[in-house]
Image (spheres, rainbow, N blue to C red):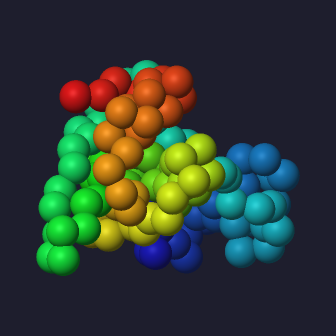
Amino acid sequence: MTRLFAGTPFDIPPTCDRCGELEEACKCPPPAHEYLPAEKQTAKVFTERRKNKRVMTIVKDLKPDETDLPKLLSELKSAIGAGGSLQENQIEIQGDHLARVQEKLKSIGYRVR
């Protein structure tokens, strides 16, 4: 990164906001990622039939940069007692658990459609 007055008497190197050290010498941990509150997000929940008549419950329309999808996946899996995975920014739960997934998401605070 080049600074506007680099190499002149007006050059002020950037410092850390928390400790006041130069950014190169700062040892502060990076700030935690802030996610959007669940109340401000809407999830689309539906079931999908796969090959060999297997049914999957899909949760989609949650943005990965605004939602902690791995944490939400583990909460849903433990609440429902089924396996699942994260595929292409959507949560897939094994089995037909539409009502239970919707209920759990509403209890967390998500709007469900």
> Which quadrant of the figure has residue 113?
top left
Q: Nearer the viewer, residue 104 or 90?
A: 104
Q: How many marks can you see?
A: 0
Residues 12 and 70: in front is 70
The residue sitting at 51% across, 72% down in the picture is: 6
Residue visible at 22% across and 50% down in the picture: 47
Q: Position of residue 107 (x, y in %)?
A: 52, 24
Query: In this orientation, which residue lies closer to the viewer: 15 or 64?
Result: 64
The answer to whether one can see residue 103 in this image is yes
Task: Tell me: 54 left or right of 78.
Answer: left
Give the quarter of the image for residue 74.
bottom right
Image position, residue 45 (x, y; %): 26, 41
Residue 44, above or below 6: above
Q: Residue at x 49, y 65 (%)?
A: 83
The image shows residue 28, relative to residue 37, as above or below, that is below
Would you place residue 9 above or below residue 1 in this image? above
Tell me: residue 1, above or below residue 112: below
Q: Nearer the viewer, residue 40 or 79?
A: 79
Residue drawn at x 84%, y 52% is: 19
Left or right: 15 as drawn, with respect to 91: right
Is residue 62 among the parts visible in the rendering?
no
Name the spot of residue 64 as percent of width and height, x first.
37, 55
Residue projecting furthest to the front: 53
Residue 43 image point, x, y percent? 29, 37
